[in-house]
Every structure is written in structure tokens, then in C-alpha cells.
Amino acid sequence: MSVLVNKDTRVVFTGITGNSGGFHAKLCMEYGTQVVAGVTPGKGGQLFDEKVPVFNTVTGSIENEGANTACVFVPPPFAADSILECLDAGIELIIAITEGIPVNDMALVKKKLLETNARLVGPNCPGVITPGECKIGIMPGYIHKPGTVGIVSRSGTLTYEAVWQVTSLGYGQSTCIGIGGDPINGMNHTDAIKLFNEDPDTEAIVMIGEIGGDAEEAAAAYIKEYVKKPVAGFIAGTTAPPGRRMGHAGAIVSGGSGTAEAKIAAMEAAGIVVAKTPSDMGTALLEAWGK
Amino acid sequence: MNIHEYQAKQLFEQYGIPCPKGAATSSRDEFESCIDSLSEGLVVVKSQIHAGGRGKGTFTDGFRGGVKLAKTKAEALEFANKMLNNTLVTIQTGPAGREVQTVYFTEGADIEKEYYLAILMDRATSAPVVVASTEGGVEIEKVAEETPEKIFKAYVDPTIGLQAHQARGIAFKLGFEGKQAGACAKLILNIYKMFWENDADMVEVNPMISMPDGGVSALDAKVSFDSNALYRHKDIVAFRDLNEEDPKEIEASKFDLNYIALDGNIACLVNGAGLAMATMDIINHCGGEAANFLDVGGGATAEQVTAAFKIILSDPKVEGILVNIFGGIMQCDVIAQGVIEAAKAVSLDKPLVVRLEGTNVVQGKKLLADSGIEITSADSLADAAQKIVDIVAAN
């Protein structure tokens, strides 16, 4: 078992004929993901990689190939439209990789998203992987291993770092979810933690956060109240100067809110073992887990 | 992206937002004509820099106040002459301060009461929020902490925009009555229109004022924009003032690199914002200090990596470099190729520690090993950070 995606997930890539969309669609297929269709308006009827049918619309990919999950690789100016198209077409899970979508566009997407039952992961995220079954996104497959640790993070490469540490210690992952670094996104830390908490095959959880916003504090409060599974965590940005935006549009400390200290304190108060450095995420997990 | 107050006021005028009449210049020769273009009476002389706390700031030559009220034209000229090309230090500039390259003159306003008004995107609700307070002209963070009951908010449904009743509601909560409440609501609605149509991150008016004649006015303006949306706002991009930015950050932005100069001596080149922050954190934990934040992003090319190296090496404080790449969308062999080309192009003479992991890591490591460049390789993040800190400390 796992959360969000598994071997039966049928994926449509929007923007599959673009350079990075195509590159990563192929890597996902090599990993074993069922990439059943692509969408590029105007290129319907073509075959991607000589086997994946390309459609003009998302609806086309659902009607003809039974796609139920979308991976959005469309460039920023058109990405919000692509997500909205997926929502209108009835896709249940949308994973948006695109980085650099204007925040106003995402405010409109979010409003629409909340009117549906669909889930959005991202944007500006590495994607979702259930090791050994399904990889949707840009994460390197080989660092993962099937197992029982659920990992959630805003950051892409920092998630890989955590996954690699867990794998190197001999443990695998149930599912890894990269929720993305933008100020407005779909799933948040708490949503992911809820899924892991309810998943019988997830035994322990790693939650990675960073400065800015208060999503980590909210997740910590949820964990304190409802989660009995062991949880380890890390917050990036302890040394980031206030008022400067550290790459992720979300990673900014302003007016004293969103500091690493406040987040670490909230997590520790919830019984989460917080790693002192990004190199200790794996060992923090073992400590929380009693292994 | 930030803009100057005088530029924000130009936008205010376009959107019918009442503010004192003003004129800005970067030339001493134009001071008089600027002042003459205003009505006779009090003149406010305002230093234009991208930092708050100007009024309470001090220039490095001892002249106090980046915003001054002049009673006469002669006094206004005197203030402006002292400000232009002088360096203003405020709580937000850091000790180095910023050189004032533009002076803005505005007509003095008849202030009855000061208020605070801002519109920004609220992460928690994923929607724009109007924030207003009866406590204007002071630090809003302090008001929020000490007297949160004096702060009023209205959350906006972005699909329909700010509604008139919401703007009126704020005006009444601020204590406005009758026609003046209408004027305040109109000002708030127009600021929202400007905020949304231009993809602003934040519009802050501190203070907004009420006047004895029944009017309201935006006395100050601090406006910033969503850099992801600048592609659809050429007119806003034209407001960009490169004098306000670190030259290394400007160079970095040309290559789509995310670079922020910091105070330490260990340069880092990392892919991904989270990992870049974490790399700074662990350098610090190992007893060193990062010279910069540098995220080379998702699909960096060899050219971008070379540019990144040139930028970090142009910082004279740098005594060592840590490259930390966990390849996902980024392929390790591309990074390795970039490192090799850069080392050749810039005749690298600083110690370099490289840690590679992820997509195409084997090819990447091989390229580096075969390159003949002196590189200390590291197997983990902790190992890499400790190595560069030790090497720099030993030199």
C-alpha cells in the first residue's frame, strides 16, 4: 500500500512534447510508471517516444486512455490553464512540476480547486513517487527503495537528500510527496501527514520544511493531536537573513513570522525529532522510530 | 521586484488613487523646476531608496532624516542637495546604507489622522487580503503584536475581486463617516485594482491620511511585484532600478540564477532552493559562514554553471567553494561539465569541494576525476561541509 499513486495509476503528461516534459516522461516510463498519454494542443495524433499517444485535450486522454492522474510540465505562462483544464476534465490527482507560475494565477486555480474533489500537488515541486511502483515527477528513481517511511517536503533536492539518507540506512519509503515551494500550492504538509497517518503501510514519517509561512506549525499541531506514528523533521533556512527571499517564492522570513526557530519549537513540542543538520535527517528518523 | 515611492505614485495616479502632487529628479539642476511645479507652501523632500525607515535614517555624513519637511523653497533645496548622492542608513539598509540617487518632492499635506493600509497575498487563505489599522505611520508589526484589535482585515475572493461592501466595511471600522468613508472605500478599491492588475506582491500605504477638507490621501507608497509575472508587465519592468541591486545579483539574474550575496567566506553552488538553504545551514553548523545563497535551478546548462562560478569568484571575500548537487531534473554530468569549463575559463585558484549525487552521478564523477582539475570530492553533505570549512580554516 501507499498513498496517492501506485502501479495502477494511469498518467497523462501535459507538455509531453516539450524538452523537459519529454525527458522526464521517458524517465518515468523507464521507472515503470504507466504513462498512458500526453497532451500538447495542436499535436494531437502524434506518438510520443513511438508509443504514447498525444492528444489535443486532457479530456481526449481520459476518454481514449483512461488517464486518472496528470503531470503538468507546461511552461509558466500556460501552466495555470493546464491545471484548470485537468480540473474541468475531471482528473482526480494533478501533479504540477512547473516552476515560476504567477501567484495570482495560482490564487484563481486554488479557488477552483477547492470547488472540486481533486487533489493538486505542487506547483514548483519534484512530484510524487511510490518506490517500485510509480514515479511521477523529476526525482531520480534510483535513490528510492520500497518501504514504510512516508516523506513530505516543500523542497525538491532536499527531499532527495532525505530519501537518500533513509535508503542508505537500509529503510525504504511508502510514498514521497514534494508539495512545492510556492506561496500558494495544492496539498500542504498537514494534508500529506493525514494521508500517511491513515495509510496502514506507512510506519514512520519524515516532514521537511523551510522558513516562511506557517504550514509546518499547522502540521505540527495536527501531529500533536492525531498522529501516533513516529515523526522526524528538519527545517531549512536557520541561517537565512530576514527579508530576503531564498529562491522559493515561499521561503522568506518577514516581520518575525516564519522563522526556523518558531517552526522547530512547534515541531519539538509535538514530539517530532528535529534533525540538527540536513545530514542528520536519516538518523533523526531512526531516533524517533526507536530503531 | 521593488520600485521606488515616486514610481508607485505614478501608478497611483493612473489608478485614480489620491496622493500628494510630486516631482522626482536625479539631477541637481532640476531641483528648482521640480519644486516650482508644486503649489506654494510646505514641501516634503524624500530620499528615494528601496528600503523602509527613511524618515528615521541618518546619512553617513551625519545629516539626519531621509524624509524632511521644508517650510520654504530655499530649505527644500538645501535638504535635497544634502540628500542627493549621499548615503542613507536606515534600519532596513544595513550599516553600509544606500546611495540616494533620486530625490522626490511632494506637496505638504494637511494631516487630520494617520492610518495604515496594505494589500498582499495571504498564504494561509491563498487569497489577497486587505489589512488596515487606525495606527498609521508606525511599524505595523508592533501594532499587530501589542494591539491586534486595532488591525482590520478583509479577505478577497480573487475570482470576483474586492467588493465595494468590503472596502466600505474597512472604512467604517477605521472610524470614517459619511462622504469621507466613501472616499476611503474608493481609495481601497482602486488600490486593489492596481494590486491585482499589475501582479503586485504587496502594496503598502503607511500612512494613509484623512484631511480636514474631507479627503483621504496616500502619503507614502511601498510596492513590490511578483517576479514570476513580470513577463506580462513590460511597463513595470521599466521601473526596475539596477542601482538598488547588488551587481552580482544582477549578473546572476541575466543567467536565470538565484543568487543572494551574504557575509561569509565560503561560496556555495547548489541546485534547489531548499538544499541551498540547508547547505548554508550546515556550513554554519560546521563552524563556517556562507558567502552566498546560489540556486542554479532545475535545468541548468554548462553555460549557466560557468556564469555562476564567475559570479561567486567575483566576491573578494570568497576563500573556498562548495558545490553541492543532488541531480533530479539537473543531471550531474552537466554540472560536472560546467564545473570543468568554469574552472578553465576563470583560472580557478580557490579550494573547491564537490559533492555530486543523483541523475547521471557516475558520468559526472568520472568527468571530474578525468579533468585534471584539483577538486576535493565528498560523499555526503556533512562530509562536504566539514571538508570545505576545514580547508578554508587551514589556509
Image (tube, rainbow, N blue to C red):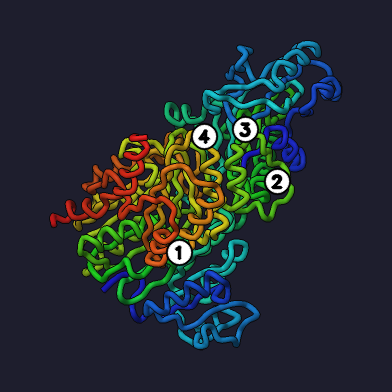
Dot 1 and dot 3 residues touching (CB under 8 Å):
no
Dot placed on the residue nearer the N-terminal end, 2 or 3:
3
Is residue B157 among the parts visible in the rendering? no
Dot placed on the residue nearer the N-terminal end, 2 or 1:
2
What numbered label is drawn on residue B236?
2
Q: Secondary structure at mark 3?
A: loop
- Kindly identify the residue that appears in the image at 46 percent across and 69 percent down: A94
Gap in Å between the C-alphas at discs 3 and 4? 25 Å
What numbered label is drawn on residue B333?
1
Q: How many marks?
A: 4
Residue A162, image x, y percentages: 31, 57
Q: Chain of mark 2?
A: B
- Kindly identify the residue that appears in the image at 45 percent across and 80 percent down: A35
Please give left or right for residue B342 compared with residue A77 in the image.
left
Q: Are marks 1 and 4 on the same chain?
A: yes
Q: Amino acid at mark 3?
A: His
Binning the other alpha carbons within 10 Å of mark 4 as few (below 14), some (14 to 19) or many (20 upward) gives few
Binning the other alpha carbons within 10 Å of mark 1 as few (below 14), some (14 to 19) or many (20 upward) gives many
Gap in Å between the C-alphas at discs 1 and 3? 40 Å
Q: Are marks 2 and 1 on the same chain?
A: yes
- Most extreme residue toward the front is B372
Residue nearest the viewer, comparing B43 with B47? B47
Q: Amino acid at mark 2?
A: Ile
Gap in Å between the C-alphas at discs 2 and 3? 15 Å
Please give left or right for residue B166 compared with residue A147 in the image.
right
The residue at which mark 4 appears reads as B316
Q: Amino acid at mark 1?
A: Asp
Residue B212, image x, y percentages: 71, 21
Q: Chain of mark 4?
A: B
Above or below, comparing residue B14 to residue A109 in the picture: above
Dot placed on the residue nearer the N-terminal end, 1 or 4:
4
